[in-house]
Image (spheres, grey):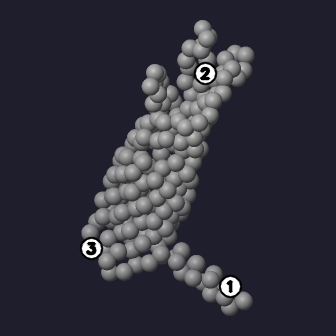
């Protein structure tokens, strides 16, 4: 048992010791979040990834309507909206395997998102400020003979949005809370 545990620890150390072979990359994201993406290495394994883009999302969540007297209405169900948002994330990235064709790395971390969202409804549509927290995890394939990298990631998170509207002749604040998820394929040009 001690030999197996020692071997597992040595394997993890060997995998973590591999450093990424580029300094930064810039490109696009495609999927449930579409936009521009920058990824830069702060250290051998600590990465800053910044995304700016839009997405169309359908998720289950809750809308609470507040006035001066407290909650006056609460509904939950499927919410459909689009967002324009800014997503900075800090990641840990480490190489899994390197060949003559490409290197494969895994990454995991988390970050924040902020921007604007517009809820899609038949009778009314209102823009609102949106913010949230998200995790991020995935894999990256860096081509050995071309300055291109491909990534695939999933970003589960929690989001909120607020806006002011008229409700029964009063001004009310609607608070939207929802599961904020994204599945993204990234294509970036590499700067060495």
Badge count:
3
User: In this rendering, is residue 108 above or below 161?
Assistant: below
Residue 45 position in % (x across, y down) = 50, 66
Residue 128 position in % (x across, y down) = 50, 27
Q: Residues within 10 Å of mark 1 (few under 14, many from 20)?
A: few
According to the picture, the residue beneath numbered tag 1 turns out to be 5
Q: Earlier in the sequence, mark 3 or mark 2?
A: 3
Q: Earlier in the sequence, mark 3 or mark 1?
A: 1
Q: Which of the two marks, 1 or 2, is nearer to us in this view?
A: 2
Q: Earlier in the sequence, mark 1 or mark 2?
A: 1
Residue 107 position in % (x across, y down) = 50, 64
According to the picture, the residue beneath numbered tag 2 turns out to be 173
Helix, strand or loop at disc 3? Answer: loop
Q: Residue furthest bottom?
A: 3
Helix, strand or loop at disc 1? Answer: helix
Q: Tell me which residue sits at (47%, 45%) in the image.
A: 87
Is residue 2 among the parts visible in the rendering?
A: yes
């Amino acid at each position: 048992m001690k030999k197996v545990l020692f071997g597992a620890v040595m394997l993890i150390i060997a995998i973590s010791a591999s450093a990424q072979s580029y300094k930064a990359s810039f490109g696009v994201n495609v999927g449930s979040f579409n936009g521009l993406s920058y990824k830069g290495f702060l250290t051998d394994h600590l990465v800053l990834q910044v995304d700016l883009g839009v997405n169309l999302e359908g998720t289950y969540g809750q809308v609470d309507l507040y006035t001066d007297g407290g909650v006056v209405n609460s509904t939950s169900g499927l919410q459909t909206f689009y967002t324009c948002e800014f997503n900075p994330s800090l990641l840990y990235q480490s190489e899994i395997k390197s060949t003559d064709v490409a290197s494969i790395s895994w990454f995991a971390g988390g970050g924040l998102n902020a921007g604007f969202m517009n809820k899609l409804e038949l009778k009314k549509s209102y823009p609102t400020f949106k913010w949230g927290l998200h995790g991020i995890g995935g894999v990256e394939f860096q081509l050995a003979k071309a300055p291109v990298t491909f990534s695939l990631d999933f970003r589960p998170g929690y989001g909120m949005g607020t806006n002011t509207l008229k409700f029964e002749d009063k001004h009310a604040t609607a608070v939207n809370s929802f599961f904020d998820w994204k599945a993204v394929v990234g294509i970036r040009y590499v700067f060495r």
